[in-house]
Image (tube, rainbow, N blue to C red):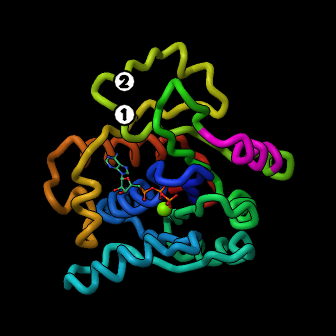
Amino acid sequence: MIVALLNQKGGVGKTTLALNLAGEWAARGKRVTLIDADPQGSALDWSQQRSREGLPRLFGVVGLARDTLHREAPELARDVDHIVIDGPPRVAGLMRSALLAADLVLIPVQPSPLDGWASAEMLALLSEALIYRPELAARFVLNRCGARTVLARETLADHDPPVLTTTIGQRIAFAVAAQSGRLASELDDDTPATREIAALAAEIEHLEIGRAAS
Ligand SMILES: Nc1ncnc2c1ncn2[C@@H]1O[C@H](COP(=O)(O)OP(=O)(O)OP(=O)(O)O)[C@@H](O)[C@H]1O
Ligand SMILES: [Mg+2]
């Protein structure tokens, strides 16, 4: 399965969720490659930091911030169980290419009643991609949910794209781990952050979508 984390809003958790999801699948014995499709190269930086710290490789990280991503991703996908694409903020060409490559688009959003969850441009690009690829699946994933965030089930059910049941809280472990090239699960494998990522990975696999879903 090719999963792309996309949202033109910056700092919503694309890289954090991409790395931790890839790590979770790798820990479960899946072969995973993470494509860094962000010219900022945050996932590549993480990977470099990881090797500086002398930590073992968990999954491959490939820099591919090019509009030809959709032509190269299927070949990369042939050798692995899952490809996770860490998308860029604000680069429409790259976003389009990632939408053409993906089986599933995950849109991380911080639930806030004050602003739209994804930019109008992001949703327009998604609608455009769905014309060519009606089989493309898309889901919102709520990230950095505060303890007091009240999420009424009925409200969530109304959203298009739908919202995943698993939500990720505001967890300092993600930021602390990332600084040393680690995943939250490598700091402590029994924390809310780790449990939420495991639940997210499981929920995505149960969606049973994608060409190479296993
Ligand atoms: N659930 C969370 N709890 C706490 N901190 C988080 C969480 N998710 C992300 N962060 C922190 O928020 C910051 C932005 O996250 P991240 O880099 O993953 O966002 P992004 O969408 O990839 O940003 P960009 O658009 O710049 O690529 C990082 O410092 C990260 O550690
Ligand atoms: Mg990022």
Q: Is residue 38 magenta?
A: no
Query: Is residue 73 left or right of 44 when viewed as pictured?
Result: right
Question: Which residue is drawn at the image coordinates 50% and 56% (left, top)?
Answer: 214
Range of the magenta residues? 118-128
Question: Which residue is drawn at the image coordinates 47% and 48% (left, top)?
Answer: 12
Furthest-front residue in view? 114
Q: Marks 1 and 2: CB-CB under 8 Å?
A: yes
Query: Is residue 194 left or right of 100 when viewed as pictured?
Result: left
Going by the numbered disc 2, the residue's amino acid type is Thr
- What SS does tag 2 mark? loop
Image: 130 above or below 183: above
Q: Quadrant of residue 87?
A: bottom right
Mark 1: few, some, or many residues within 10 Å (few <14, many ≥20)? some
Q: Tag on residue 2?
A: none
Residue 147 position in % (x across, y down): 28, 27
Q: Nearer the viewer, residue 147 or 129?
A: 147
Residue 46 position in % (x across, y down): 36, 74
Q: Main secondary structure of the magenta part?
A: helix
Mark 2: few, some, or many residues within 10 Å (few <14, many ≥20)? few
Image: 176 above or below 140: below
Q: Tag on residue 149?
A: 2
Number of numbered markers: 2
Question: Which residue is drawn at the image coordinates 23% and 71% (left, top)?
Answer: 180
- Mark 1: C-beta under 8 Å from nearest atom of ligand 1: yes
Residue 88 position in % (x across, y down): 59, 63
Residue 163 position in % (x across, y down): 54, 31
Q: Report the residue marked by disc 1.
A: 145
Q: Is residue 127 magenta?
A: yes
